[in-house]
Image (cartoon, rainbow, N blue to C red):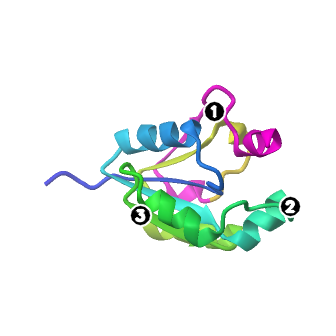
Amino acid sequence: MEEEKIIWTNGCFDILHVGHIELFKYAKDLGSKLYVGIDSDEKVKLDKGDDRPFNKLSDRIKVLESIKYIDKVFSFDSTEGLENLVKEYKPHVLIVGSDWRNKTVIGEQHAQHVRFFDRIDGYSTTNILEWK
């Protein structure tokens, strides 16, 4: 039996867009299981401001769980919570946005590899919310 390769990515995933779907598709192609970490509402508010998240955690989880590329979704309240999840699941590959290149990637010491994913055509939740 082939070894299970867990792939991990995380984010707010507040307003899903094509860039997110391409990230999940790319990630799933790298392994057998894709685990997605999602920031709690409180953490999003701290990181992004009082106007965020646009969608509450339970709704964001439900939408992520419906995406065919994703096998499990986990929420976390802090950077320590995120690091503990990555440590627990020890992914083969940890995927983060390319804007994290040359920065500290939370949990990177618990993954076999770190890969960076470039934004797709400038898609970003912040840009989408600014268009409203």
Give the x, y percent position of residue 20: 55, 43
Disc 3 marks which amino acid? Answer: Lys
Reply yes or no: does residue 108 show up in magenta. yes
**Helix, strand, or loop for circle 1?**
loop
In the depicted view, which residue is nearer to us: 110 or 61?
Answer: 61
Residue under circle 3? Answer: 72
Give the x, y percent position of residue 66: 41, 58
Residue under circle 1? Answer: 119
Identify the mark nearer the N-term, 1 or 3: 3
Task: For marks 1 and 2, give the one nearer the viewer.
Answer: 2
Give the x, y percent position of residue 49: 86, 61
Image quadrant containing the C terminus: top right
How packed mark 2 is, by other alpha carbons closer than 10 Å (few <14, some 14-19, many 20 or more), is few
The residue lying at 57 percent from left, 72 percent from top is 58
Q: Residue furthest top?
A: 121
Disc 2 marks which amino acid? Answer: Gly
Residues in magenta, as a range:
107-132
**Helix, strand, or loop for circle 2?**
loop
66 above or below 93? below
The residue lying at 49 percent from left, 36 percent from top is 22
Residue under circle 2? Answer: 49
Tags 1 and 3 touching, CB below 8 Å: no
The residue lying at 74 percent from left, 64 percent from top is 44
Identify the mark nearer the N-term, 3 or 2: 2
Reply yes or no: does residue 39 show up in magenta. no
Residue 90 can be seen, yes or no? no
In the depicted view, which residue is nearer to us: 105 or 14?
Answer: 14
**Cα distance, mark 3 to mark 2?**
27 Å
Identify the mark nearer the N-term, 1 or 2: 2
How packed mark 3 is, by other alpha carbons closer than 10 Å (few <14, some 14-19, many 20 or more), is some
